[in-house]
Every structure is written in C-alpha cells, then in structure tokens.
Amino acid sequence: MTAVHGQCDPRFSRVREVFDGHFAEGEELGAAFAVFLDGEPVVDLWAGVADRHSGRPWERGTPALTYSCTKAVTATAALLLAERGLLDVAAPVADVWPEFARGGKERITVEHLLTHQAGLPVIEEPVPVEEFEDQAAIADRLAGQAPIWEPGTAHGYHALTYGFLLGEVIRRVSGRSVGEFVTAEIAAPLGLELWLGAPQDVAARAARLSAGERRGTAGTAEGTGTAEGTGTVEGTGTAGGAQALSGAAPDTAPDAVPRVSGAATPPGDPLTEMSRAVLDKDSLMNRALGNPPIHLLKGGANHPVMLRSGWPAVGAVATARGLAGFYRDLVAGRILRPATLAGAVRRRVDGRDMVLCVGSSFGLGYMRPALTFLTPTAGAESAFGHTGMGGFLGLGDVEHGLGMGYTMNKMTGAVSNSLRAYRLAEAVYGSL
C-alpha cells in the first residue's frame, strides 16, 4: 500500500480517506492535495512517485506542470494591471497592441480574450519548435489572422492561444512577460511555490507526467485529454491535437473516445459530439489543441523547453500547496481587491462551447461551475478557478473561505477513471 504523507485536520478526515483510496485503487502514480480554510492549512497531503521510470518519490516540494490551471493565474495578472488603472478590459486589444488591428479584429476587446470570445482558438500556420520559447513571435502569427467567428457572439475554449494573446497584452502594458510579472507581483511577495517559466532547479524536481496504464487501444499517441474538466470530459486522443498537447510518456495509449462511467451517450448528446471531435483531426478542438505541436518534443510536456517557457495558457509549474495558496490569497483579498474579484468571477459566458462541444462557463478568465468545471452542489454558485488537462484542479470559494490545489502525474484519459479532483473537492465541501 502506498504511504500517504503530510497533515490533515481531523475535521477533514474524509479527504484523507478519499486521497488514500485513489492510490489503493491504482488511480494515482504520484499526487498531492492541499486545502486552506479561512487562510489556515487544513489539508496538505502527498504520496507516490514523481517519476514512474526512476521511482523518484513524490515529496512535499514536488512541483508539476499544471496545464490550464495556468489560465487563472494569467487572468489574475491582467486583472491586477486593470485594477491599477494600466489596462482597460473593456477596451480594444489594439489600443495596447496596434498590430492586432488586422483581419477584422479591430473591435476585439481584452474581455473577449479573457472570456474565450475572440474567435481565435487556432493558430493557422504550424509553429516550428524553434519558436516555442518566443511568445511574441507566436502572438504575431495570431495578430495576422482573422477570427473564425464574429467576436463576442459565441465562446469557444482558446486552449493555447488564450495565453499567447493575453500574454502579449500583458507584455505590452507591463513591459514584462507574464512569468516575470507573476513572479514579481504575486508569487514572490506571497511566497507561493508557483512559476511560469520554471527555474532549472524547480524543473529538475518536477513530476514527470504519464498517461497511466495501457488499455489495449492501437496507436502510439501520448494523448491524455481534450477538455479539461475535473474529470467529466477528459476524452483522450490517438488523433490530432489531443495527442499533440499531451505530456504523457510514450509507453501508453489511452482510449480515444470519452466515456461516461457505465452509460452510453445518445445521439446528439454533447459528449457524443465531443467524441466525434476528438477523433476528427480537422475538428476545431484538435486544431486548437494541436498547435504549437508539443508532441514534437521528446517527452512532450516533460521536455525542459515546456517547463521553462512559461506559456501563459498551460505552462504554470506549481506544487499543490502553491496552487492552493494562490486561491487562498485571492479569496483573502491579498492579490486583487474583493470587488475586483467579485466582478471577475461573475459569469460572462455560459452554454455550448464552440471548441469543446459541451457546456462551459467563464468569468474574466476564471472557470465557473459547468460540465467542464464539475463542482459539488455546495459550491455550485460560489466556486471559481480552473482545471488542467489530465485532472489538475485549482479552486477558490469566497463564500466558504476555501483555496484548493490538486496536482498529480497520472494523466488519466477515461472519464470513468478521472473524477479524482471532484471526489476530493466533494470531500472538502462535505467536511465543512
């Protein structure tokens, strides 16, 4: 049996039981879960291995690439600039990035970027590996494109482009990359174990992501996810962008079609539509997920380039405690003013997602409860945050005084086996 390390307040003993159960059932390789309640640490658990090949143990300070949990951090940087009067989220992007005003994008606002309404979920031209660390060059590619839909009329998950677009706005306004800004203005002052652009020593001890068990599906894909819910719609890929975004080890190939535990999806069901999109290499979903093509790097997202590049959509490296601490400090008003946060978590878009094919909901950069951000009933109106592909979760809740962070390295692909973060969150809410 895998030994679980750390501390857990007796009031949250159910959380430890769930965490331990995930290892007992073989659902985890290595993982960590941290919770703050009203600013106080009540859960800080870790267990397993950080690298399945070497057997390196998961330790208290083991960080992991958290994929799209990053988006909430990048949104917070933009909102901090807005709070300081340096950025108007209602104004056109072109006001701070004049080259952006091409191809019918003159009226796209910063809010459109934050709410995935810009119509730019895809980079049309292939991004060469040599350009992966040149975020400004990738942003320039997007500046030359036309929107796929009329901005502001629909929303669709900008899986990778979100970061390059919003990151360029932040760079133009602050003179710093998102990673530099977050370190100087948020992470370092608050002592958070969170980096957008991991230093060499942090990258060296980072967990190595893996796809888990082989399921007998043909193919050599490293796919581990398309939509990034807490486990609801993480269908995996042997096709297109789903594999391209993956950072899992190449010795596995999870199922290609999303599944709901024990249930078939009827024709016209959103999950059925999503399943088709996963398998269609030309779908908007796979095009959005597949460029820049991370799979061209040896080891995918485990490659040093990905750990140090700090892509503002998927590049944050953090410990569970660092991720939970970020939400603790947001909830406590130590990063943004309470009024700023309240306005930012208000639902701005809700309903069918043009890219993910299922329902999603966003405030200004923060996910709100929906099929892509499954939340216990007690948090259905108050929780906010962001998930990361494979199962990562960062969650805040002002009403309940909560900050949570869940990190792991077994990036599951089957919906029936990927509700780990939800179960942990459910145990937290149930313990209040």
Image (cartoon, rainbow, N blue to C red):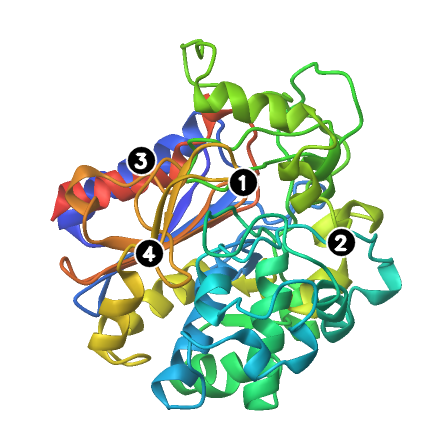
Q: Quadrant of the N terminus?
A: top left
Task: Work out whether 25 lies above or below 173.
Answer: above
The residue lying at 79 percent from left, 22 percent from top is 219
Residue at numbered disc 4: 348
Q: Are marks 3 and 4 in contact (CB under 8 Å)?
A: no
Q: Could you tell which of marks 3 and 1 lies nearer the N-terminus?
A: 1
Q: Could you tell which of marks 2 and 4 lies nearer the N-terminus?
A: 2
Residue at numbered disc 2: 292
Residue at numbered disc 1: 390
Task: Work out whether 425 lies above or below 162.
Answer: above
Tell me the kind of residue under disc 1.
Gly
Q: Are marks 3 and 2 in contact (CB under 8 Å)?
A: no
How packed mark 4 is, by other alpha carbons closer than 10 Å (few <14, some 14-19, many 20 or more), is some
Q: Secondary structure at mark 2?
A: loop
Tell us which disc is closer to us: 2 or 4.
Answer: 4
In space, the residues marked 3 and 4 are separated at their CA atoms by 27 Å
Task: Work out whether 249 lies above or below 168.
Answer: above
